[in-house]
Image (cartoon, rainbow, N blue to C red):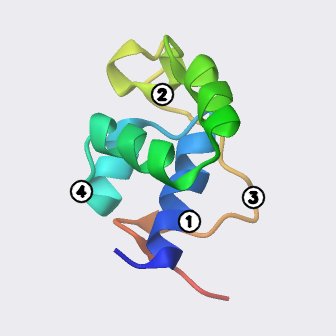
Amino acid sequence: MTDLEKDRIIEMAWEDRTTFEAIFMQFGLKEQEVIDLMRIEMKASSFKMWRERVQGRKTKHEKLRDFKEGRFKCSRQRTISHNKISKR
């Protein structure tokens, strides 16, 4: 895994609305693998803060979400599909 991919996974894991399923679809990492990556790549205090935020958060798990469709999408966001990001 490249440093760029690790950075993107960490960024996605920090985002409240990005599910672990989305990370799995793009990078093939299961939730526990994402947690392990975060533990290795982050300072202990940052990892602890992230785990407290993520544990039990409904938006991080697709099955626990109250909404299925109509998610927020920024008007400036381009189409993203399976880790292929459209460029300007």
Q: CA distance from mark 2 to mark 3?
A: 23 Å
Q: CA distance from mark 2 to mark 4?
A: 16 Å
Q: Are marks 1 and 2 in contact (CB under 8 Å)?
A: no
Which is more toward the observer, 35 or 28? Answer: 35
Q: Nearer the viewer, mark 3 or mark 1?
A: 1
Which is more toward the observer, 54 or 71? Answer: 54
Q: CA distance from mark 3 to mark 1?
A: 24 Å
* Residue 59, x across and y down, in percent: 52, 23
Residue linked to disc 2: 60
SS type, badge 3: loop
Name the kind of residue labelled 2 in the image: Lys
Which is more toward the observer, 49 or 67? Answer: 49
Comes first in the chain, label 2 or label 3: 2
Mark 2 closeness class: few <14, some 14–19, many ≥20 residues within 10 Å: many
Residue 75 circle label = 3
SS type, badge 4: loop
* Residue 14, x across and y down, in percent: 62, 42
Comes first in the chain, label 1 or label 2: 1
Instruction: Please give the name of the residue rendered at 67% of the width and 88% of the height, measured from the top-left corner.
Output: 88
Mark 4 closeness class: few <14, some 14–19, many ≥20 residues within 10 Å: few
User: Image height check: is 5 above or below 27?
Assistant: below
Q: Are marks 4 and 1 in contact (CB under 8 Å)?
A: no
* Residue 68, x across and y down, in percent: 42, 25
Residue linked to disc 1: 7
Q: Nearer the viewer, mark 1 or mark 2?
A: 1
Residue linked to disc 4: 28
Name the kind of residue labelled 1 in the image: Asp
